[in-house]
Amino acid sequence: MIMTLTYGATDGTRRDQTLFFKLNGDDSREAERYRFLAGRGISVPDVALCVEREGEEVLAVQFVPSVGVVAIDVDELVELVAALNSLTDVPCAIAATRPGMVQSEFEQLLARALDEISAVWPECRPGAWLEAYREAARIYLTLPQALTHGELAAQQVGRTEDGRLVLFDLATVGSRARLADIANLLETLVQVSGQDEQTVLGHYLHHLSSASGSTGPTDQWWAELRLTRFVQELEALPWRVSLNRPAELRHHIQTIAADYPAVLDQIVA
């Protein structure tokens, strides 16, 4: 819910403040994540109010009137994501992620989704992806971890009325594979900037190195990103199939198909 509040300031003037109100009923403690990130210099909307009750919280944060990513945002956003991913000494309460579906149950859902896709796009050989996913997911769990947004996309980025570029919807913030965020966001950054994927990744790595000192050959980071993206795309696939948006789904299928050979090389190495 969005609400504009009018109040009298201490100087006698009347002021307006627009806030976004959100009810979290899953004990996500999102306000704690907002406050932690703000305290560590990560640009997020200001928290105006949080009422905590057993198992839920009512959160009011600064309204973000401009949501999405355009070309002039790309460099600033890449730097912001790198700053988030470089944070260390993160409290367990912030780094913790919520448990997901039992793996065997998820793989059944994925198998059914791949069967549906095989009937429409057999040339992509989606029937081979399940076994590759199992091996890639095992490697994914051993990758270096970082603090990540968790569901970072253009819809979780925007500018406040005072012009700050911010990340929001922070209930999913937690420790995951270190390239999880940039892997989710890379395609959008490429589309709006006109740059290629490895150029955008190079800019991200430059900022990450400046913030944390992480270095290493770019081709190793690129391989890690492709495996990360392959796992994340497949884990989102049952949901994407359920949306019944063929054009959008085709785009994701093409991304998976493009990453598949590179992931196979890592699995058999």
Image (tube, rainbow, N blue to C red):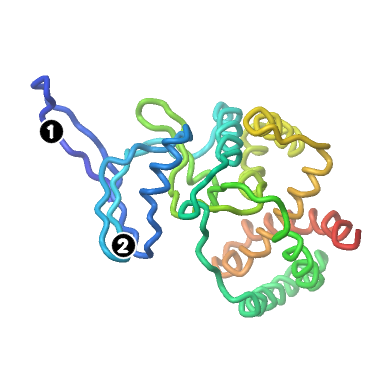
Q: Give the number of the mark in front: 2 or 1.
A: 2
Mark 2 sits on what residue?
Answer: 56
Give the image location of residue 96, x and y in percent. Answer: 51, 57
* Residue at the image point whose x is 67% and y is 59% from the top: 233
Q: Quadrant of residue 23?
A: bottom left
* Residue at the image point whose x is 18% and y is 38% from the top: 5
| Amino acid type of the residue tagged 2 in the rendering | Glu
* Residue 92 versus residue 246 in the image, above or below: above
Give the Cα separation between the discs numbered 2 and 1: 28 Å
Q: Quadrant of residue 26?
A: bottom left
Q: Sort mark 1 into few (<14), some (14-19) or many (20+) by Cα contacts within 10 Å.
A: few
Residue 158 horizontal side relative to residue 46, left or right: right
From the viewer's side, name the closer residue of 118 and 216: 216
Label 1 sits on a secondary structure element that is strand
Confirm or deny contact between disc 2 and disc 1 (CB under 8 A): no
Count of all numbered marks drawn on residues in the image: 2
* Residue 120 versus residue 80 in the image, above or below: below
* Residue at the image point whose x is 48% and y is 40% from the top: 157
Mark 1 sits on what residue?
Answer: 7
Q: Sort mark 2 into few (<14), some (14-19) or many (20+) by Cα contacts within 10 Å.
A: some
Give the image location of residue 159, x and y in percent. Answer: 43, 33
Give the image location of residue 156, x and y in percent. Answer: 48, 45
Question: Which numbered circle lies on residue 28?
Answer: none
